[in-house]
Image: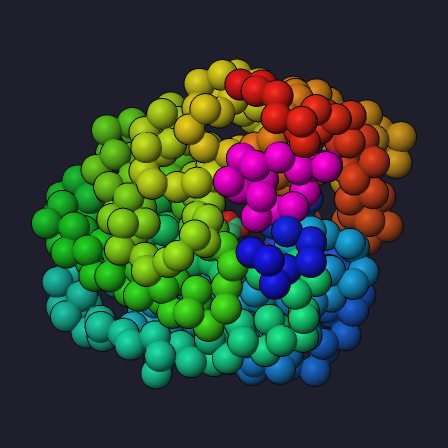
Amino acid sequence: MSEIKNDLFLRACKRLPVERTPVWIMRQAGRYLPEYRAVRDKADFITMCHTPELAAEVTIQPVDIIGVDAAIIFSDILVIPEAMGMKFDMIESRGPVFHHPLRNEDDAKLLKQIDPGKDLKFVLDAVSLAKKELNGRVPLIGFGGSPWTLFTYMIEGKGSKNFSYVKKLIFNNPSLAHKVLEMLSDAVADYLSAKIEAGANAIQIFDTWGGILAQDDFEEFSLWYISKVISKIKRNDEPIIVFSKGVHFKLEELAASGADVIGLDWTMDLCEVRKKIGGKVALQGNLDPTVLYANKEKIKEETKKVLRSFGEGPGHIFNLGHGIFPDVDPENAKALVEFVKEESKVFHRKDNIGDDYV
Ligand code: CP3
């Protein structure tokens, strides 16, 4: 950790004392920044993902412009299905659309086992390059989708309201679902290990669609594979964050998955969650992303509410409860980061004299 000048984020992940609460923003490298849009004007989204120099450039932007305490490598969770042979387009205002969604055994037979060092070298090169350009200013987060979330996109073929195709598959052909989820777990674990080897200081697993499952199904189709990925990742002390959106109902189980940090969406009560699992894991979150549409006074008030909800002591990383929206004013994102930096100090006054809080 010592080669990183600002290591507040890494210390908070390990629930170690900090002078103030660290802050970063999910989707911080994105369209709300005019500087991102300028790069994006020159290249389409998938080309940006495939070009290490462009990916590294937009990764650094929010560190310079917004002042966040961690960078997250610009890429997409869908580079894994793409490397397995499933091509997709990123369509403006619609999102990703796969050319041929996976629907049956024959489709599954076409999936290729990946070698991240070869098939996803462009991401690993982006990590090394971003790391070099960051020059130890803040830690660099690597990320991947959970097997379940990747599986959902591969089956549905695009964003979905009812998730009919993926639900039909888990109920009517669970053995095929498990076969593909198993394959995805190996791919995600190898990929995240390679990202750590390339220089990532922490890993976030995005389980964006965990919350669409009923409780038992969540354990069987999502949590099981998240735990498997975590146990297979080769790491030293790089912390792992799991963000399972909408999963109010399995917090203890998530805390026992091997993750160091659990990310929370804005519908959850930080104070309550801390009481339940704050002794085992750090917590990340959880300001409602739409608060960034409000004026600065309101943003400050809501920021303080989140900080107060977690309360005193270490183990909190400030973030939004999901990604920042593309039409947010970057000045508001900047103000949010400033408010967290200022207003969180009082919650850590005793951190450095060894008091025990939890
Ligand atoms: O957080 C960061 O700044 C790092 C970059 C990042 C992107 N995608 C870049 C991106 C990360 C961490 C992701 C993860 C991702 N990708 C997730 C999980 C996170 C979450 O929000 O739940 C998911 C579900 C995807 C798949 C994906 N990629 C979708 C559904 C979309 C379209 C939605 C949208 O906002 O348009 C994307 C596109 C995407 N990924 C953009 C960015 C900056 C916008 C595309 C553009 O520039 O045209």
Query: Which of the 4 image quadrants contains residue 308?
Result: top right
Magenta residues span 8-22
Residue 327 seen: no
The one nearer the camera, 330 or 319, is 319
Dividing the picture into quarters, in which one does residue 144 lie? bottom left
Taking the image as shown, residue 262 lies to the left or right of residue 357, namely: left
**Picture coordinates of residue 357 (x, y %)?**
58, 19
- Magenta stretch containing residue 300, yes or no? no
Q: Residue at x 65, y 46 (%)?
A: 8
From the viewer's perspective, is 15 left or right of 152?
A: right
Q: Residue at x 36, y 51 (%)?
A: 146
> Principal SS element in the magenta part?
loop
Answer whether residue 211 is visible to the viewer in this image: yes
- Whether residue 18 appears in magenta in the rendering, the answer is yes
**Front-lying residue, 146 or 109:** 146
Q: How did the renderer colour the structure?
A: rainbow
**Residue displayed at 47% across by 36% down:** 262
